[in-house]
Image: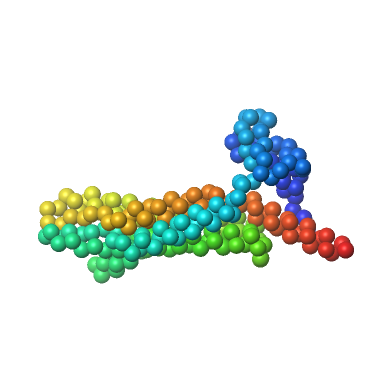
């Protein structure tokens, strides 16, 4: 069964005012349409969506490496600095029996960014190849990833909070390490990557493969 989409009916949705505009069938995909209501210009689909998603996602993955190798915070005790990376910091919280904080940091700084990066790679791969593509399921997955992303910043807030709280003590002080910058970059890059992905491509690809199948069946 063919799914009927706005694109297949030669319509295009204005992202600003959400009006469905006529989009002539002969129009080039790379050409902008002007909305009849708000006069804004827009594309029917985000151009080079998969390429941009892939590029930002690779950048996020690269930034994630120094984010884990460099110390995220340095605890100074009697003037002696003790740097800890994300993973060793989690280990220290576990050693001190602070399991909830360890769990929050592990989820926010390891699981969520990795899930998002791997998930976006998977979506790009599925749309590109059309292998086992289920648009209903995959669009839900995409929106879940989009929702999860900003929660990684929780990790940055925890470090900021620790720096502010422990700074008040005389003997011990905490300084944020260079990894915090790379980690913030990872979060920002994955957010841009998710934003570059056009989930409507899931249905486009599905429809293309169905049209292809029906044409072949009719032969
Ligand atoms: Zn409009």
Colour mapping used in the image: rainbow
Of residues 209 and 92, the one drawn nearer to the viewer in this rendering: 209
Q: Position of residue 55 (x, y in %)?
A: 52, 55
Q: At x 77% / y 42%, what residue is drawn?
A: 26
Q: Is residue 86 above or below residue 41?
A: below
Residue 163 location, x and y as percent? 24, 52
The x and y percentages for residue 117 are 49, 60
Q: Is residue 90 left or right of residue 165?
A: right
Q: Is residue 120 above or below residue 192?
A: below
Residue 19 located left or right of residue 52: right
- Total labels: the figure holds 0
Question: Which residue reaches farthest right?
Answer: 219
Nearer the observer, 4 or 49: 49
Q: At 75% from the left edge and 47% from the top edge, which residue is drawn?
A: 8
- Name above or below for residue 167 compared with residue 78: above
Q: Residue at x 77, y 43 (%)?
A: 25
Residue 150 visible: no
Vertical side of 168 occupied by 115: above or below: below
Quadrant of the rendered image containing residue 121: bottom right
- Residue 121 visible? The answer is yes
Quadrant in which the C terminus appears = bottom right
Residue 125: quarter of image = bottom right
Expressed as whole percent of the image width and height from the top left, the position of residue 181 reads 34, 53
């Amino acid at each position: 069964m063919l799914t009927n989409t706005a694109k297949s009916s030669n319509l295009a949705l204005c992202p600003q005012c959400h009006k469905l505009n006529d989009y002539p069938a002969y129009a080039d995909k790379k050409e902008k349409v002007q909305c009849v209501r708000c006069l804004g210009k827009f594309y029917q689909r985000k151009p080079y969506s998969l390429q941009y998603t892939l590029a930002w996602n690779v950048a996020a993955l690269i930034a994630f490496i120094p984010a884990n190798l460099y110390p995220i915070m340095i605890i100074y005790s009697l003037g002696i600095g003790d740097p800890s990376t994300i993973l060793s910091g989690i280990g220290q919280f576990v050693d001190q029996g602070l399991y909830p904080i360890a769990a929050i940091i592990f989820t926010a700084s390891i699981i969520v960014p990795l899930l998002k990066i791997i998930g976006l790679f998977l979506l790009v791969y599925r749309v590109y190849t059309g292998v086992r593509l289920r648009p209903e399921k995959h669009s839900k997955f995409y929106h879940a990833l989009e929702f999860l992303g900003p929660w990684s910043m929780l990790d940055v807030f925890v470090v900021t909070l620790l720096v502010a709280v422990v700074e008040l003590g005389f003997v011990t002080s905490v300084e944020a390490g260079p990894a915090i910058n790379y980690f913030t970059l990872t979060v920002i890059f994955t957010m841009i990557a998710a934003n570059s992905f056009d989930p409507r491509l899931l249905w486009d690809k599905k429809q293309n493969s169905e049209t292809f199948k029906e044409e072949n069946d009719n032969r």
